[in-house]
Structures are given as C-alpha cells and as structure tokens.
Image (cartoon, grey):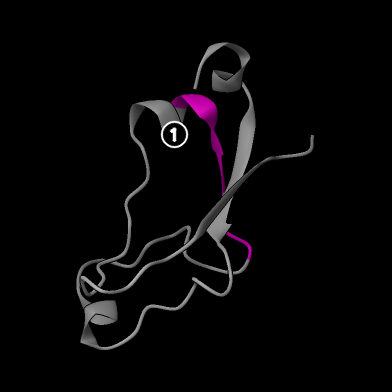
Amino acid sequence: MPGDALAAAYRVRPQPPGDVTDGNAADWGAALPWWSATGVQLSGRVLDTAGLRLPVLYPDRVVLIRVTEAAD
C-alpha cells in the first residue's frame, strides 16, 4: 500500500457469496472481529504492517474479502 494509502482508512468485511465458512473448519481458532456484515475500519498502515487474519478453511474452499476506502 504505497504513499497516501497508508494514511487512509478502509472498511474490511467479507463479500457475498464468498462470505460463508462451512463444516467444522468454521469452528476452529478464535473469532475474527472483522467477519461480520459491517466489518471493521482499519488504517492502511495497519493493513500494510499487520495484515489481516483469515478464517480457517477447508483446502477446497474460498472466501472473498471486500476492502473499500472509508468515507470520512
């Protein structure tokens, strides 16, 4: 995330139809605060430095993540 993107705020949330984890893999690990319909707002610096923890999935599954610049 180069330049001004680090200072911007972003909304991170799961994107349908890839927003459903299934089977017992969905129960493994800790809950993800951003995995909700409203998601969370994070700075570009946080996303660039720490990244985003993904859900545990079966190998043949996929999820979609929407990251949009948050309006002030």
Q: Residue drawn 37% across and 78% down?
A: 21
Q: Look at the numbered disc 1 and give the secondary structure of its residue.
A: helix
Q: Is residue 35 left or right of residue 59?
A: right
Query: Based on the displayed image, in which of its 4 quarters is residue 27 positioned?
Result: bottom left
Position in image of residue 53 (x %, y %): 32, 51
Quadrant placement of the C terminus = top right
The residue sitting at 42% across, 66% down in the picture is 63
Image coordinates for residue 5, horizontal then vertical, percent: 59, 21
Q: Residue furthest bottom?
A: 23
Residues shaded magenta: 38-45
Q: Position of residue 39 (x, y in %)?
A: 57, 58
The residue at the point 33 percent across, 56 percent down is 54
Residue under label 1: 47
Mark 1: which amino acid?
Leu
8 shown above or below 72: above
For the point 71% across and 40% down, the residue is 70
Relative to 4, is 49 above or below? Answer: below
Q: Tell me how many marks there are.
A: 1
* Foreground pick, 43 / 57: 57
